[in-house]
Amino acid sequence: MLVGMNDKDHSGQGRADDERWMREAIAEAALGEGGTRPNPPVGAVLVKDGAAVARGRHRRAGGPHAEADCLSRAGEAARGGTLYVSLEPCSSAGRVGPCTDAIVQAGVSRVVFAARDENPRNAGRAEAVLRAVGIEVSGGVLEREARALLEPFFTHVRTGRPFVTLKMAQSLDGGIADHAGVSKWITGSEARAEVARMRRRADAVLVGSGTVLADDPSLLRAEEPEGGLPGMRCVLDARGRVPATAKIFSDGFASRTIVATSEAAPERAKRAWRETGAAVWELPAALPQTERGGAAPAPGPLSLSALLAKFGEEGFLHVLCEGGAALASSLVSEGLVDELRLFVAPVVLGGGALRTFGAFPHDLPTAPRFGIVAAARFGEDAMLALRPARKPGGRA
């Protein structure tokens, strides 16, 4: 049994103190978000005599875990202290040794963690290991707050694919571009700043080829997590339409670019992409290829399930999709969206506008449905955070 959050240790620390220090451990974890793949972002704080002695976090796979980082900074001062960590300490060896070993060796007297690890190699084991040597263990402190940060990692553990956030910006009447195809800018600077923060938390930004051809975006992060892996950008281009002169290939960071394409795409396009330093993933088509008057079959749309599986194999935990309309519609229609962030600008685009989810029709009784979990305002624009309430076809 885990010690309840109201139980007190030998220092008289109760629930309020535990929550205070756990918030700091979670804040440390957030600093590494988006750079720790395939590991989760985890933070730790070592407390002694009512004061923080050291803080630590996991920065990059292969580097020290949060517990080890924190304890090494604390040194001998860790002996007899309380270690707060946002995720149950690992008890199995990977690229580094088990964190439970480091905790025991440091002489910590109490460990408080927020969320239990869903990785079966570690889930529930730390408590027994630590208690066996006389270390007090408390779990579940601010678990909901910690799990919000760990959700992409847990999704990857359960499904083998990354957590998918779909971000779309639209007008009041559901348009993402006007009748002439102009889409810059529907939303204002405050909303765009929030999108930049969303990119900072994701491992990769995903767009369709139409978005690159229309806007020639950079898709790079404005800020990278210190010591972590850089953010990646991925474009879906089954037909080889995007030229190697596009910004995602020519801005000096082509090594951060992935092109998801098909075997049937022109070899000259794939060769040109690779020559820039970009990675090229050849994926199966979602549908059979179509014939074009006896010529070679035209590449069909790529399998999004195969793409997400590939992301998962490569260790990506969180993918942020920024459109366009066809890609967004496909993700929603196939039930592959874990979170939808919809930015709505107070403008009406009227007839001829390109619609947010206009690529595929749905019957009302079985259409994909979402539930609103949060709302916020950024300047003049509103943002709705939504989660799937029903899968396409009416499945719960």
Image: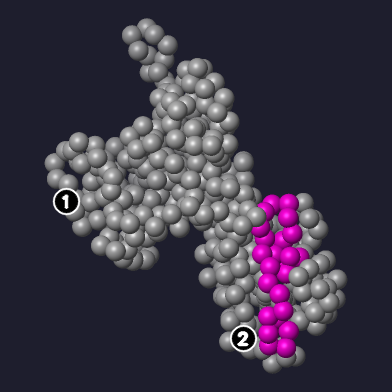
Residue 113 position in % (x across, y down)? 66, 73
Report the Cα–Cα distance between label 1 and label 2. 50 Å
Mark nearer the N terminus (1 vs 2) = 2
Colour treatment of the image: one colour
State whether residue 103 is above or below residue 211.
below
| Magenta residue span | 47-70
Residue 302 position in % (x across, y down)? 45, 30
Q: Residue, x 69% and y 57% (percent of image)?
A: 120
Q: Is residue 25 left or right of residue 387?
A: right
Q: Is residue 63 magenta?
A: yes
The three-letter code of the residue at mark 2 reads Asp
State whether residue 142 is above or below residue 36.
below
State whether residue 284 is above or below residue 17.
above
Q: Residue, x 51% and y 17% (percent of image)?
A: 267
Q: Quadrant of the N terminus?
A: bottom right
Q: Secondary structure at mark 1?
A: loop
> Label 1: which residue?
348
Q: Residue, x 41% and y 15% (percent of image)?
A: 297
